Structures are given as C-alpha cells and as structure tokens.
Image: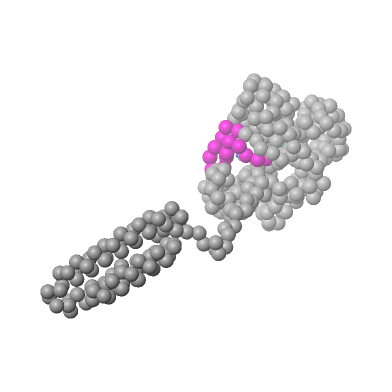
Amino acid sequence: MEAELHRLQTEARAALTASVNALGLEAFRVKYLGRKGLFTTVMRALGDVPVAERPRLGKLANDVRQELEEAFAAREAELAGSQMAVGAPRSDLTLPGRLAPFGKSHPVTQVMEEVCAIFEGLGFAVAEGPDVELDYYNFEALNIPPHHPARDMHDTFYVSDSVLLRTHTSPMQVRAMQKAAPPLRMIAPGKVYRCDSDITHTPMFHQVEGFLVDRKVSFGDLKGVLSVFIAKMFDKKTPIRFRPSFFPFTEPSAEVDIGCVICKGEGCRVCKKTGWLEILGAGLIDPAVFKMVGYDPDAYTGFAFGLGMERIAMLKYGITDIRMFYENDLRFLSQF
Ligand code: FA5
C-alpha cells in the first residue's frame, strides 16, 4: 500500500501541473480527490494491512491527501487570474451571436400613416405645423375670441398669455388657407395637447385634420369622403352615425361615431355602454373663418374634420384603455 500511495502521489502531482484550465482542474478533483476517486480507493485497502502497520500508513495517507488538496487549492488560485478557474465566467466562442432587437413604429404612428395614405389616395396634400402655437391660430382665427365659452372645452396648456400647446390640429386650416388660394384639399397630422386623462383621453394625443375648400362644397361631400375613409380604415359594414354638434369654426357641425368594435355595439366600458365611440368632429367651414383668411365666403364653401388617432387605433386593435399606448411596455408595443 505504501508503494501504491507514493505512485499515486507522483501521478497526481504531474496531473495537477498538466491541468491548465477550469475543466482540467475539475477533472483532476473528481479523478483523485472525489468521493469515488483513486485516493479513496487506496484508503479502503488500509483495512487489509497488518494492525501494527496501520498508524504509520494511515498517517502517510493523510499527509499525501493533505498535500494534494493544498496543491489543488494553490493551482486553482493560480488559474483564477486567467479567468479559467472553476466557477469563473467562461466564453464559448462557438455559440451563435444574439440578434439585436429591431425597433418598430408605434401603433399610433402606424395608424396615422395608414390614415394619411387613405386621404392621399383621395387627392389630399399633407401639411404639418407647430405643436407650440399662437393663441391666435388655435382660437381667435377659428372664431373663438378671448373669453368665448368654447375655450373651456379645450383644457389648454398655456406657455404664456398668447402662446400655448395646440389643443387641436384645426389651426392648420388657417395657416394653410393664409398661404394658398382655393381650391384646397389638405390633411394635417400631428400631436395635440389637453389637460385630460382617463380610459379614452390622454394629455397628449394625435389628430389628423382634413379640409377641402372649393365652389359648391356641400355637407354631402363631407359625408361621402368620411364614409369612404371609414369603409377603408375599418370594415365596409362598420356602422357610422353623424350627431349634430357645435364647433365655433364650422356651421353646421357634427361629431361622427362608429359602432364600438370592442363590444360590437352591445355596450362596454370603452364606449360607456352606448355602443358608439366618437372618432371625429367635422362640419362645413364657418364663413367667419373664411373672412379671417381673406377668402370670399359668398364664392367658396368647404368642409373640415378632425380625427382622433388614438381612438381609431383603439377600435382597430380592440384596445380597451387609451393609456396603454403611452406606458412604453414593450410586451404591448411589440404586438403591432
Ligand atoms: C376638435 O378637436 C376639433 N378641432 C375637430 C374638428 C375639426 C371639428 C374640424 C370640426 C372641423 P374634438 O375636441 O371633439 O374636436 O376632438 C376631435 C377628436 O379627437 C375626438 O373625436 C376624439 O377622437 C379625439 N380626442 C379628443 N380629446 C381627446 C383626448 N384627450 N385623448 C384622445 N383623443 C381625444
């Protein structure tokens, strides 16, 4: 047994020196020092040696084991610096690389692009204007003078007395009409802001304004254009209703609802049990606005509408809370 111990000691020392990485060290530990390793096997033979020899051989066996354990620990520490020790992070250069995630357009942006494409297909030109707007364009030129009660409907964020965050895209009607003579057929997509928040309202949302000015434009033309748009955007069978309403810059005015696609008209939380959801305001442009921009109200008529993009996106994708669009949850956003 003594000879066997010395042979094992020599062999193990050489094996330890030959271990150059974490895997090698672990293999060494299992082969020589593990519970079923070679050292344990030799120790079992201690029971067969003469009793008188046992203390000496037992001490020798312990000394050899202790020496190997200390040598193992020293080698492990030596290799730790080179990142190859047991438990240290290892790199497998053969693994395939990770794909960088691809970004996508926000669902509201996607809907807005779809809406614009439909109107562009109907011959409308696209114009964009400022989010930070003058009170004049947002209100006054749209026939909403200071202290007019209609201002209350807008929950405006003011920057100063005469500057504000636009509350709708309608100021673009005035800006466009000031720049060009009729006939005019335009849409103006963009962000708008109101101090308003619940399951169908957010403080920042998107509208697409549309307006057409020419001779003899009628409410029938407005209904025709909006019906074509709704049929293209949703389903041909989507129910539509025009409700009489009031906007100071259109006369007559209407709000347009479509049948709630979430509950199919049965009545739910989103449509507030009515079966309908309002998606836009519209009407024939008020002659007072034409006068403001220098158009002749006796020669020209026109229609205008303002569509809420988030509402359309909710209906299109069956989303029951508008605020989900702005929580930046990638699990939600990546579905579109
Ligand atoms: C207007 O903003 C008018 N400028 C629309 C208009 C344009 C009328 C041209 C006539 C002629 P209203 O406040 O109703 O109207 O808003 C229009 C649409 O924006 C609503 O139908 C709704 O879809 C959406 N909307 C309004 N407030 C919010 C809000 N806080 N969050 C999300 N969507 C909103």
The magenta segment is: 194-207
At 40% across and 55% down in the image, what residue appears? 78
How is the rendered protein coloured? one colour
Judge from the rendering whether residue 307 lies leftward or rightward of residue 291; answer left or right. Answer: left
Q: Which residue sits at x=65%, y=44%?
A: 309
Q: Quadrant of ligand 1?
A: top right
Q: Is residue 197 magenta?
A: yes
Residue 273 in sight from this viewpoint: no
Q: Position of residue 37 (x, y in %)?
A: 31, 72
Query: Can you say which quadrant of the picture contains the C terminus?
Result: bottom right
Q: Residue at x 19, y 71 (%)?
A: 57
Q: Nearer the viewer, residue 79 or 303?
A: 79
Main structural element of the magenta stretch: helix, strand or loop?
A: loop
Query: Could you say which is closer to the camera, residue 234 or residue 100?
Result: 100
Residue 44 is situated, as x and y percent measured from the top left of the image, at: 22, 75
Q: Quadrant of residue 242?
A: top right
